[in-house]
Image (cartoon, rainbow, N blue to C red):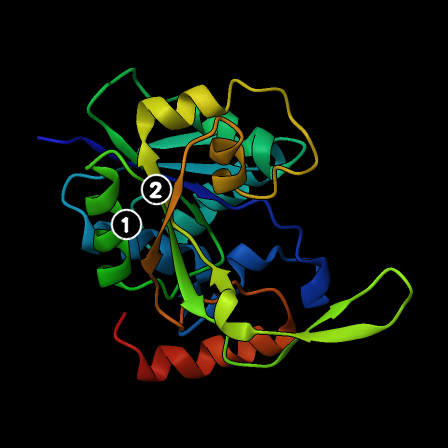
Amino acid sequence: MVETFAIIVAGGKGLRMGGEVPKQFLPIGGKPVLMYTIDAFRRALDNVCIVLVLPAEQHHYWQELCEEYNFRSPELIAQGGETRFHSVRNGLALLPDNANAVVGVHDGVRPFVSTETIRRCYAAAAEGKAVVPVVPVVETVRQILSDGKSVTKPRDEYRLVQTPQTFPLALLRQAYQQPYIENFTDDASVVEALGKEIVMIEGNRENIKLTTPEDLRFAEFTTMNYAL
């Protein structure tokens, strides 16, 4: 039986939300965003072990929220790092060495990832694949050139990348032993640096990353119309 892990990275400071409360703790539909995200993995995967990565100064506040909402905190809590790369690496450090395990890395502020998306990603990773969920680009895309001009690009050649990005645990651990570079913007880019092919899996369009106040209003509407 394949052992499953999920590293949920929640390092946001909430600046683009225009408030002091970090966005992962903002309430939607009666409870904090982060709790919806954690519950999504608990619904989708039996016996999943979750590592929650939070800045050190937020650990106590998170425990207070768990008590207030009678919420079961994840099994493991890791300290956030200087960048997302370092945060994920800190989360990986808490996981056991298991050659048969699969791990997904997910943004804490993507609460609307579907059960189907999670299961598709983990099933493919259990076959040894490095997986990212994606959705098609539906709007026109223009590329800005070095001279300041722009050109239209064929949108069917592009995909929007989501999380959970999911891998055999041994592969992701090996990838995160590499020195950090600025081009490491997500887990797939780190794994790709090893020469590993990245496989795209169908995501779900509701699985947006909550970043702006407009996103939060969308989230409030979605909690009334989306099965959580």
Quadrant (top left, top right, bottom left, bottom right) of the N terminus = top left
Residue 105: x, y in percent? 41, 42
Quarter of the rendering containing residue 20: bottom right
Under mark 2, the amino acid is Thr
User: Few, some or many C-alpha atoms within 10 Å of disc 2 (few <14, some 14-19, many ≥20)?
Assistant: many
Which residue has dot 1 on it? 121
Q: Is residue 139 left or right of residue 107?
A: right
> Label 2's element?
strand
Residue 177: x, y in percent? 52, 18
Quadrant (top left, top right, bottom left, bottom right) of the C terminus = bottom left
> Label 1's element?
helix
Which residue has dot 2 on it? 166
Residue 184: x, y in percent? 61, 37
Q: Is residue 195 left or right of residue 43?
A: right
Give the residue at the far right of this rendering: 147
Q: Is residue 151 visible?
A: yes
Q: Earlier in the sequence, mark 1 or mark 2?
A: 1
Question: In the displayed structure, would residue 210 be above or below residue 57?
Answer: below
Which numbered dot is residue 227? none
Question: In the displayed structure, would residue 20 be above or below residue 28?
Answer: above
